[in-house]
Image: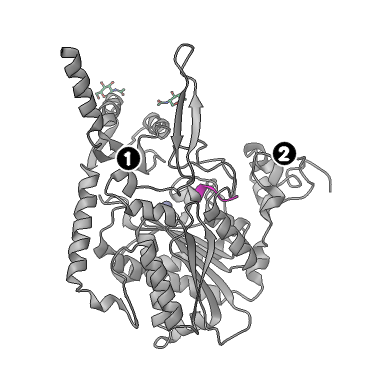
Amino acid sequence: MTRLLLIALSIAVVTQPKRFAVYRITPQTSDALQFLENLTKETAIDFWKEPRAVGQEVHAMIPDPKAGAILDSLRSRNISYSMMIEDVEKIIKNQKFARMKLKSERRQKDFRDGKVDFNLAEYHSFADVINYFNALAITYPHLVSVQPIGLTHEGRQIPMIKITNKRLSGPKRGIWIDGGIHAREWISPSTVLYFIHQLINGYDQDPIIRRYVDGMEWHLTPLLNPDGYEYSRSSTDPEIRLWRKNKSPSKCTTTAQGLFAPPQTTCCQGVDLNRNFDWFFGQVGSSTDPCSEIYNGAYAFSEPETRSVRDFISQHPMTTFVTLHSYSQILMYPFGHQVRTYSNDLDDLRNTALSAANALQRMYGTTYKVGTGADTLYPASGGSEDWAKGKGGVKYSYLFELRPEEQVWDGFLLPENQIMPTARETWEAIKVIATHTLSVPHGSGAASGGFHHSRAHSSSPSSHSPPMCRDHDQLCTEWAAGGACETWPEMRHRCPASCGLCRH
Ligand SMILES: *[C@@H]1O[C@H](CO)[C@@H](O)[C@H](O)[C@H]1NC(C)=O
Ligand SMILES: *[C@@H]1O[C@H](CO)[C@@H](O)[C@H](O)[C@H]1NC(C)=O
Ligand SMILES: [Zn+2]
């Protein structure tokens, strides 16, 4: 009887929905930092902000059943923490309710898109965006073309809109802007949609915008990861709303549990697309565990979304590459895979970034940090903006971590009333970057980096041929001078000549 009751109870516990809280944890010693770094291997915890330095905040979303033990272990190590969000799903539900209310009131007419009906001040579905693009292409045929750049695992077309004055031919500089590579960062697609609106609606009124649209080809991809985005919209369950990766098919791993226990198999879906580019693939700040939030995939460009970017940019050289993420308010330039690692035109990238961040701040006082990802956040390899600079032949390559700042409580759950201010201030930064793009002499964008076909040094596990006697990166000499031949195994393949591994 008692036994039966116990079983009934435990079933009740198991089927109860998980509750998720977000904790703010600050490691004060290197031991505490290392302990938190070890915790990142625990896939049940979703680090909204990963541990990176002593004294810097970590944000961790932890499900109820795990919280007790984890918080105990923090207390026993004197690691201080506080609760940032008590019940994540409650906030998601409240925001959804507020959105529905707003929609039913339909008050925000001033945000409508001129001739095409589209409310920029709300988060939109994939289908809404496709319809919007098609309406723009029909309404502004002289400025707009829409084309898919690839097909996702679930069969969605990745939509790209090209904006330029088609009546003017001649060489034009290319600028690429993508959003939504990480599914849960909803503010990023919305911000790209605002840029599209500005370029099209400003064309007739604003001489600066006319210069941008006449002199450049804008390639805007607001939803680079539509499968993940749609999935994150499909439920208020925090594990779904806060989905980060794409929706690649499940991969299973089997781990031995000791002599007498059967091996355990776990299966997880999704690749972190911003670890899947061919730039020091798989070396730092990424994981080979398919259940990790930062799973880098089986090999570089294993995913259709990242391959689409690579293929498009290899066929259409860009002067400028911008990718939007959230959150933290940081403007990053390459390189992010190692601290204090820069391109040889660092001054151009940095000065442009500083003016862009200044222009952004002038709008509402929002402050941004400016630097490389490795210097401002943490080193991570396989990122798109590093690949664009290091291999894609781009002159200006930037990653924005949009609002909110780190210390606020809402993180990825940025309310809809923040969309317009975020988009407006970010547009000010983009205008600075666009102006600098226009002043790059023709032909020098692609020439300064040169597109290297990735096959030459693919990071797929099968490529273990002896190194050819030439460097595969422009920056090899600098890296070698900095001692990278000794510290980076990848250098043997990437920079055999500079590392003195062969004769010319
Ligand atoms: C972190 O993990 C490593 C390797 O498993 C271990 O040697 C180390 O003691 C751990 N550090 C802390 C602070 O838990
Ligand atoms: C935690 O702090 C207490 C009181 O300051 C101290 O007695 C204890 O040794 C500390 N524990 C650790 C693991 O540092
Ligand atoms: Zn991101």
What SS does tag 2 mark?
loop
Residue nearest the viewer, comparing 335 with 116:
116
Q: Please, what secondary structure does the residue beneath circle 1 have?
A: strand
Looking at the image, is 28 positioned above or below residue 77?
Answer: below
Kindly identify which numbered label has been placed on residue 477: none
Q: Which amino acid does label 1 sit on?
A: Ala
Q: Which percent across, then down, holds residue 477?
A: 70, 51
- Give residue 189's position: percent from left, percent from top: 39, 62
Q: Tell me what residue is drawn at x 65 percent, y 71 percent.
A: 444
Q: Give the range drawn in magenta.
A: 274-278
Q: Residue at x 70, y 41 (%)?
A: 463
Q: Say which residue label 1 marks.
A: 60
Q: Are marks 2 and 1 in contact (CB under 8 Å)?
A: no
Q: Tell me the distance, in whole angstroms, between the alpha carbons under discs 2 and 1.
A: 38 Å
The mark found on residue 464 in the picture is: 2
SS assignment for the magenta stretch, majority: loop
Discs 2/1, front = 2
Q: Tell me where residue 131 appears, x and y as whole percent.
A: 39, 71
